[in-house]
Amino acid sequence: MEIFKYMETYDYEQMVICQDKQSGLKAIICIHDTTLGPALGGTRMWTYDSEDAAIEDALRLARGMTYKNAAAGLNLGGGKTVIIGDPKKDKNEEMFRAFGRYIQGLNGRYITAEDVGTTVEDMDLIYQETPFVTGVSPAFGSSGNPSPVTAYGVYRGMKAAAKEAFGTDSLEGKTIAVQGVGHVAFTLCKHLHEEGASLIVTDINKEAVQRAVDAFGAKAVEPSEIYSVDCDIFAPCALGAIINDETIPQLKAKVIAGAANNQLRETTHGDLIHEMGIVYAPDYVINAGGVINVADELNGYNRDRAMRKVETIYDNIEKVIEISKRDKIPTYLAADRLAEERIERMRKSRSQFLLNERHILSQRVR
Ligand SMILES: NC(=O)C1=CN([C@@H]2O[C@H](COP(=O)(O)OP(=O)(O)OC[C@H]3O[C@@H](n4cnc5c(N)ncnc54)[C@H](O)[C@@H]3O)[C@@H](O)[C@H]2O)C=CC1
Ligand SMILES: O=C(O)CCC(=O)C(=O)O
C-alpha cells in the first residue's frame, strides 16, 4: 500500500514499525492525532494474511480511537497497535517487554491498553518497561473488567436514543432485542430488566442464552430471527457489519443502540436507516465506557469518577442527535462531526492543553 499517501489523506501523525528478532515481536504502532492529548488505544494481536493487512488495520483502528476519545470528551488522542502473530502460540515474556520499551521510546505520545488477542497479563509485562500502559492488574491500580462499565454506558446511551424516538427515556414496557448475550450484554440486560423492559435475546452460545432466560425471563430466538422480531429497540452486542442490505429490510425497531463495534457494513447503510426514521446511536459513542474506564487510570483509578464520566454518554448521544437535526445528516456522520468540532476547538487552544498533558503524565511516571 502507499502508506504516505494514505497517511496524508487522513492526516496521520506517525507510524512506528517495531521488530525484535529475539522475541519475534513484529508490531506496528500507529498514532493518528494527538491534538487532544496522548494517543490512547489498545494493542491487537492477530494473524494477519499480509503485512499490508496489518498496517491497514493499525491505521484504521488508530483513526477510530481519535474519534472515539474525542466524542467521549476525553483529553486523549487516537492510536492503536497491532502485533502480528497468533495470540495462542506466539506470545512470550520478552515480546511484551520489548514492546514496552518501544512504547517507552515514544515518551508518552502513545498509551496502550488491551484489545483483541491481548490480556491483563500482557499489560503487566509492558508495565515492567513503561508507565504508558492501562488495563494492568488491580495490584498496579487497574480498573479491572471493563464490560460492566461498557454495559452501563450502552444503557445510558440507549435511554437518550429512546427519548428521541418515543418522547420519554423510560424503558419500562419497551421490548428490546439483544443480539449476543456475552460479557457486555448480560449486564446490559440486567439494567434493562430492572427498569421493566421485556427482553428478546439470541446467541450462538446456548448456555449464554439460557443464562439470560433464567435471570431476566428473556424470550429466546434463533440467531437468524433476531433482526425481524417485533421490538422497540434493537441492541447489537455481538458482531460488526450487522446493519446491512440483508438485515435492514427485516428491522421493526425504532432505535438501534448496542455495544458492538463497526455496526454499519457500509456508511450507506447509516444513510438508509436514517431515511427510514430509525434512531441510530453511533457505536463508538455509545460503547465508549471501556475506554473511559481505562483512561481514568491515568489519574489514579477511581471507580466513582469513571462511572460519572460514563454517565455523560447519555449527553453525548443527545448531542449527536442535535447535530444530526441541526445539519440534517444521519447520526453516524453527526458523531464524526461532534468529534471533529471538538478537535478543531481544542487545536486552537493547544498551548493550554500541553500543560494539562504534562500534568497527567507526570502522575503516571513512577
Ligand atoms: N467488553 C467491552 O468493554 C467492550 C466491548 N465492545 C464490543 O461489544 C461487543 C460485545 O463485547 P463482549 O460482550 O465483551 O464480547 P463477548 O465475546 O463476551 O460477547 C459476544 C457474544 O456474542 C455472541 N455471538 C457471536 N456471534 C454471534 C452471532 N452470529 N449471533 C449471536 N450471537 C453471537 C458470542 O457467543 C458471545 O456470547 C463486541 O463487538 C465488542 O467489540 C466495545 C467496547 C468495549
Ligand atoms: O477499552 C480498552 O481496553 C482500550 C481502548 C480501545 O482500544 C478501544 O476502545 O477499542
Image: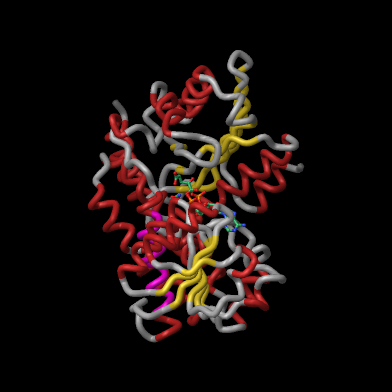
- Hey, which residue is sitting farthest bottom in the picture? 167
- Where's residue 107, x and y in %? 43, 30
Tell me which corner region of the image, top left, top right, bottom left or bottom right, holds residue 45.
top right
Compared with 130, 354 (above or below) is: below
143 left or right of 104 in image = left
Main secondary structure of the magenta stretch: helix
Region in magenta: 150-162
Q: Quadrant of the C terminus?
A: top left
Q: Nearer the viewer, residue 312 or 206?
A: 206
What residue sits 43% from the left and 60% below the top? 212
Whether residue 140 appears in magenta in the rendering, the answer is no
Q: Is residue 162 visible?
A: yes
156 left or right of 51 in image = left
Q: Nearer the viewer, residue 295 or 356?
A: 295
Whether residue 158 appears in magenta in the rendering, the answer is yes
Tell me which corner region of the image, top left, top right, bottom left or bottom right, holds residue 328.
bottom right
Total labels drawn: 0
Q: Is residue 281 visible?
A: no
- Where's residue 166, x and y in %? 42, 85
Q: Quadrant of the N terminus?
A: top right
- Where's residue 216, x and y in %? 38, 65
What residue sits 48% from the left and 57% below the top? 181
Image colouring: secondary structure
- Where's residue 28, x and y in %? 61, 34
Compared with 141, 130 (above or below) is: above
What residue sits 67% from the left and 34% below the top? 47
202 left or right of 268 in image = left
Q: Nearer the viewer, residue 269 or 203?
A: 203
